[in-house]
């Protein structure tokens, strides 16, 4: 029997719809052993107007019962609710998730403008770079099923840290394919034809049938988003380099472009 997971779900009281909480409630039904859900209620001061006239920042007991407890009770999921008053949004999430021994952190991602699908504050990038466990970014319109999981790798990598990140991505993707009885696909983009990923090596090293190995020329963000759409991926697993001296490159990097290009839920594996 599978081991019970601890899912750490961030809920912002300013939101009208709690997409991360809803996704946890739905996906818990797909698991052999339902997870324990740790609900973390906090306000991201970088993304929310925290001035006194914002009535959404005042929530009573009825709100907690209706918006959180009833959702998880109806799903038959064990849970607890924790409220944070910390002004350090991302740090409070990381510390609480660590204390809870969380296996996953779920956070909602909201659209910003018509020209840009989703908006990330600096604090969210700090969270992606510093979390001790995978972070799952939940889109309001993404699939709720977990039948096809797409692992985005870079098998042209030569640095040890990048090779290790590939291994982490594949290990996580395999694990969640087992949890959800999903089909694993692997995608690898490339820019230089002289550095073409070896499809045979990809199939051999990943154990994935060649028909589920996707190799294409182009920017990683373009290739991965194209394949995700073609196969109707329910979840994309990708990686980012964390606390290794590269955190200052988070803006404008491949990870940001890829997340922005995707319309599905994304699991980010941090190599810290």
Image (spheres, rainbow, N blue to C red):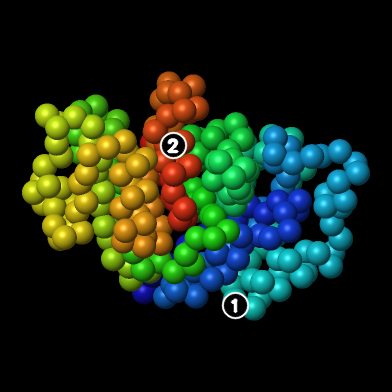
Residue in view at x 74 percent, y 41 percent = 48
Q: Quadrant of the C terminus?
A: top left
Residue ranking furthest to the right: 53
Question: Which residue is labeled 2 in the image?
Answer: 257
**Considering the numbered disc 2 on the image, is that residue within a helix, a strand or a loop?**
helix
Residue 271: x and y in percent read: 38, 36
In-image side of 102 versus 83 (left or right)? left
Residue 245 visible in the snapshot: yes
Q: Residues within 10 Å of mark 2 (few under 14, many from 20)?
A: some
| Residue drawn at 64 percent across, 78 percent down | 74
Residue that label 1 marks? 76
In the picture, the quarter occupied by the N terminus is: bottom left
- What's the distance in space between the residues labelled 2 and 1, CA to CA? 37 Å
Say which residue appears at 59% left-offset and 72% top-offset: 77
Corner quadrant of residue 51: top right
Secondary structure of the residue carrying tag 1 is loop
Q: Nearer the viewer, residue 117 or 167?
A: 117
The number of discs equals: 2
Instruction: State the image quarter where residue 173 is shown.
Output: bottom left
Q: Is residue 173 above or below residue 146?
A: above
**Relative to 201, is 59 on the left or the right?**
right
Corner quadrant of residue 98:
top right
Residue sitting farthest toward the left: 200
Image x and y of residue 251, in percent = 50, 27
Q: Which of the marked residues, 2 or 1, is nearer the chain's N terminus?
A: 1
Q: Nearer the viewer, mark 2 or mark 1?
A: 2
Above or below for 263 versus 32: above
Residue 21 placement, left or right of 53: left
């Amino acid at each position: 029997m599978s081991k019970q997971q601890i899912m750490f779900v961030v809920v912002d009281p300013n939101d009208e719809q709690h997409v991360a909480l809803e996704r946890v409630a739905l996906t818990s039904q797909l698991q052999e052993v339902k997870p324990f859900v740790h609900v973390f209620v906090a306000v991201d001061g970088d993304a929310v107007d925290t001035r006194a006239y914002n009535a959404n920042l005042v929530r009573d007991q009825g709100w907690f019962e209706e918006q959180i407890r009833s959702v998880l009770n109806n799903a038959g999921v064990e849970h607890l609710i924790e409220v944070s008053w910390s002004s350090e949004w991302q740090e409070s999430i990381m510390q609480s998730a660590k204390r809870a021994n969380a296996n996953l952190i779920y956070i909602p991602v909201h659209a910003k403008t018509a020209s840009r699908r989703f908006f990330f504050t600096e604090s969210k990038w700090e969270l992606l770079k510093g979390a001790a466990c995978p972070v799952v970014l939940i889109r309001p319109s993404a699939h709720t099923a977990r039948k096809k999981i797409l692992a985005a790798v870079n098998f042209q990598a030569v640095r040890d840290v990048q090779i290790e990140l590939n291994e982490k991505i594949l290990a996580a993707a395999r694990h969640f394919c087992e949890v959800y009885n999903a089909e694993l696909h692997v995608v690898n983009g490339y820019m230089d034809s002289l550095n073409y990923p070896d499809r045979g090596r990809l199939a051999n090293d990943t154990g994935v049938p060649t028909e589920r190995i996707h190799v294409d020329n182009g920017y990683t963000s373009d290739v991965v988003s194209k394949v995700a759409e073609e196969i109707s991926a329910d979840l994309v697993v990708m990686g980012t380099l964390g606390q290794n001296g590269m955190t200052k490159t988070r803006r404008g990097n491949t990870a940001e472009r890829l997340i922005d290009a995707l319309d599905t839920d994304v699991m980010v594996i941090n190599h810290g």
